[in-house]
Amino acid sequence: MAKTGKMIESSDKPIFILGAHKSGTSLLRSLFDGHPDLQIIPIESHVLSLLDFNTVNPLRSQKMQSLESKGDYISHLHNILLAYHLSTDHRSDNSSVFIDSLNQIQDEACKIEIKEAILHIWDLILNYVQKESLSNRRIVEKSVEHFEYAAILKLVFPESYFIHIIRNPYDNLLALRKFKYTSNYPSLHELVNVIRDSFLHAENNLKIINNYIVLKYEDLCDNPEKIMHDLSSVLGLKYVDSLLNPTVRNSPWKGNSSKNITFNKIEKHFSGIKEISPIEAELINRRCENSMKLWEYELLHVAKYSYLFPNKNEKLKTYIRNRAAALFP
């Protein structure tokens, strides 16, 4: 199922769901949605980005200037949540913000201040989206870039748990490419790096952070009852049947793919590896080989020089970028 870091006793502490885009993080959040002892933050809160912590994730496209005062993030969050509420496209969470300055946690007072700010942000989100406030139930929060911040979040919430989902990099890249780009073929450099970075952070965080769980997406899809039983045991939750039913605010989850299909159960994992192009496989092999071996994902063989052939709808500039990424990783 998963590998876990050193265990400690904890209760009523946040559960953070992390992982690369399109790796299964939203699915797992939707499975926790109906649990009576959990309070789900229904959109990605990106709390540390919002509080002026830097992130290197290249797919966080919304950028802004650093906030001037402590009150500014509240005003900015209101605007984000209003835009989310008015949006008709909820295939992905539309709450992200990207702030380009870095603060350090230097002492206990600063940690308390950050914790209070995070709880305030979560309370605002719940008020906007679900017309409720933070309760004494255990919080579940999912933000894809939080694997970069796990050590900081652990300082702020010492007894928190982390579930980091990884997915076969070929399937992850295909899903990400199809979701993000529907017309022209994209530059692959950033997409592959997001997947690579997720694996590297998972492996490093697992070594140093208590209660850090790395879960394979394929295991969750192929054996959901066992996985959710195992997770319940590790997290100290009672097992309930709703853990097998993906929902959002107690309504059937429509997923966050372009198909917009409503799910009432977890579907078996289906690999789309046959669709992968030589350049995609080549980049994954070059940047994720060690991680794939560690997590027992099989590497695809790429015929020599086959990755030099262009893909459909791949413009000249994009072609050059993609082959340069393969030649000069």
Image (cartoon, rainbow, N blue to C red):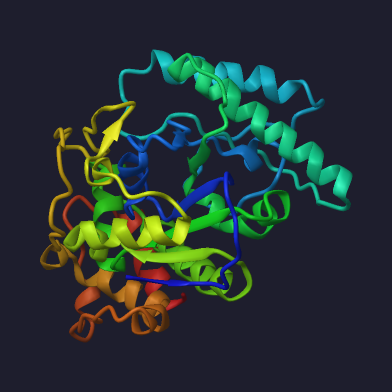
- Closest to the observer: 64 or 184? 64
- Is residue 58 visible in the rendered structure shown here? no
- Closest to the observer: 18 or 273? 18
Residue in the picture at 72% in, 49% down:
156
In the image, is residue 88 above or below residue 46?
above
- Closest to the observer: 165 or 198? 165
Residue in the picture at 41% in, 33% down:
93
Residue 106: x %, y % from top left: 87, 53
In the image, is residue 246 above or below residue 302?
above
Residue 137: x %, y % from top left: 52, 34
Q: Quadrant of residue 84?
A: top left
The quadrant of the rendering that contains the N terminus is: bottom left
Q: Is residue 236 left or right of residue 87?
A: right
Residue 215: x %, y % from top left: 37, 64
- Is residue 75 visible in the rendered structure shown here? yes
Q: How many marks?
A: 0
Q: Quadrant of residue 194?
A: bottom left
Residue 285: x %, y % from top left: 33, 78
Q: Is residue 312 left or right of residue 170?
A: left
Residue in the picture at 80% in, 41% down:
112
